[in-house]
């Protein structure tokens, strides 16, 4: 599994505790070797740098998978040599979820034939902030409703956040480019996606980016696309399986168990 971390394309790295934990838990749950890459970040490296790095990593991983092991769990052959990946998955959260979808759509046939699925966890798919949930999921403290993690974020500030990656006037110039916003990908590229799993919280500002993308995939006749909406969950709640000092979050544990079941069903 290639794992692509979130952070609005400007922060975080695989060595940071939150992503070291999440990638490790995905590996443990799914029984897969997980490669988490330190792709180039903005503003030093703007669009399409992160996309290019994700594509290169996926291509590399397709021909440099984990080594074969024997029944005793020992590596076959000497010296150590990697073998092509047989069952390849791509997963990411937030910005990494958008990267996972875009990188999957960009691959040539020899990679796609090994690619079993792409997983978006609270995926940031639309850098133009165009979907209705930017209005319907605004945080309301009186009712304890909406996206508290992104309290105060609106369409304008969402687009400003996107321009940290896309550059000045980037939303206007590149916002609907499928490499930045898979939400706007052409039909042919969407149909070419492998199996798709989208997990999103019902309280997220970007809820509809997953829900509406899934509807479009269904309308296009994609054979294996699924969206799971988790009640009252916020952006990237998967990171709270350990609780972050607040106690274990059951919905985070459930989401990763659901990923495990989905992955196991698609391993050849």
Image (tube, rainbow, N blue to C red):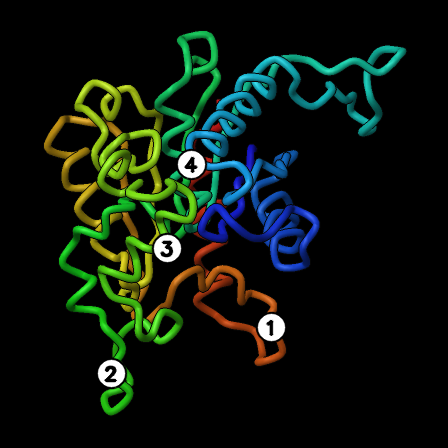
Q: What residue is disc 3 on?
A: 161
Q: Label 3 to label 2, Cα distance in Å?
A: 22 Å
Q: Residue 185: percent from the left, percent from the top?
A: 23, 29
Which residue is nearer to you in this view: 233 or 175?
Answer: 175
Q: What residue is disc 1 on?
A: 244
Q: What residue is disc 2 on?
A: 140
**First of labels 3, 2 by sequence position:** 2
**Foreground: disc 3 or disc 2:** 3
Q: Which element is circle 2 on?
A: loop
Q: Label 1 to label 3, Cα distance in Å?
A: 25 Å
Q: What residue is disc 4 on?
A: 99
**Foreground: disc 4 or disc 3:** 3
Q: Which element is circle 1 on?
A: loop
| 34 relative position to 93: left or right | right
Q: Which element is circle 3 on?
A: helix
- How packed mark 1 is, by other alpha carbons closer than 10 Å (few <14, some 14-19, many 20 or more), is few
Q: Residue 82: percent from the left, percent from the top?
A: 73, 16
Q: Label 4 to label 1, Cα distance in Å?
A: 26 Å
Asked if disc 1 and disc 2 are in contact, CB closer than 8 Å, the reply is no
**Foreground: disc 1 or disc 3:** 3
**What residue is shown at x 19% (from left), y 24% (from top)?**
186
Q: Residue 181: percent from the left, percent from the top?
A: 29, 38
Q: Which element is circle 4 on?
A: helix
Q: Is residue 76 above or below residue 48?
A: above
**Foreground: disc 1 or disc 2:** 2
Which residue is nearer to you in this view: 129 or 268?
Answer: 129
């Amino acid at each position: 599994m290639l794992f692509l971390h979130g952070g609005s394309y400007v922060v975080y790295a695989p060595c940071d505790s939150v992503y070291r934990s999440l990638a490790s838990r995905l590996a443990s749950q799914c029984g897969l070797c997980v490669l988490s890459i330190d792709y180039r970040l903005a503003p030093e490296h703007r669009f399409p740098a992160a996309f290019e790095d994700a594509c290169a990593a996926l291509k590399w991983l397709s021909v440099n998978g984990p080594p074969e092991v024997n029944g005793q769990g020992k590596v076959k052959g000497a010296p150590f040599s990697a073998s092509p990946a047989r069952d390849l998955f791509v997963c990411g959260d937030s910005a990494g979820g958008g990267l996972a979808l875009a990188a999957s759509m960009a691959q040539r046939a020899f990679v796609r034939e090994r690619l079993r699925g792409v997983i978006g966890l609270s995926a940031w798919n639309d850098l133009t902030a165009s979907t209705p949930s930017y209005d319907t999921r605004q945080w309301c403290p009186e009712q304890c409703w909406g996206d508290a993690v992104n309290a105060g974020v609106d369409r304008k500030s969402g687009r400003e956040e996107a321009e940290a990656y896309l550059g000045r006037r980037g939303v206007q110039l590149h916002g609907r480019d499928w490499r930045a916003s898979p939400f706007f990908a052409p039909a042919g590229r969407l149909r070419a996606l492998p199996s798709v799993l989208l997990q999103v919280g019902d309280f997220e500002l970007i809820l509809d980016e997953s829900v509406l993308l899934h509807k479009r995939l269904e309308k296009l006749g994609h054979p294996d696309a699924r969206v799971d909406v988790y009640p009252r969950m916020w952006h990237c709640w998967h990171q709270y399986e350990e609780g972050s000092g607040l106690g274990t979050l059951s919905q985070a544990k459930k989401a990763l168990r659901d990923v495990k079941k989905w992955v196991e069903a698609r391993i050849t």
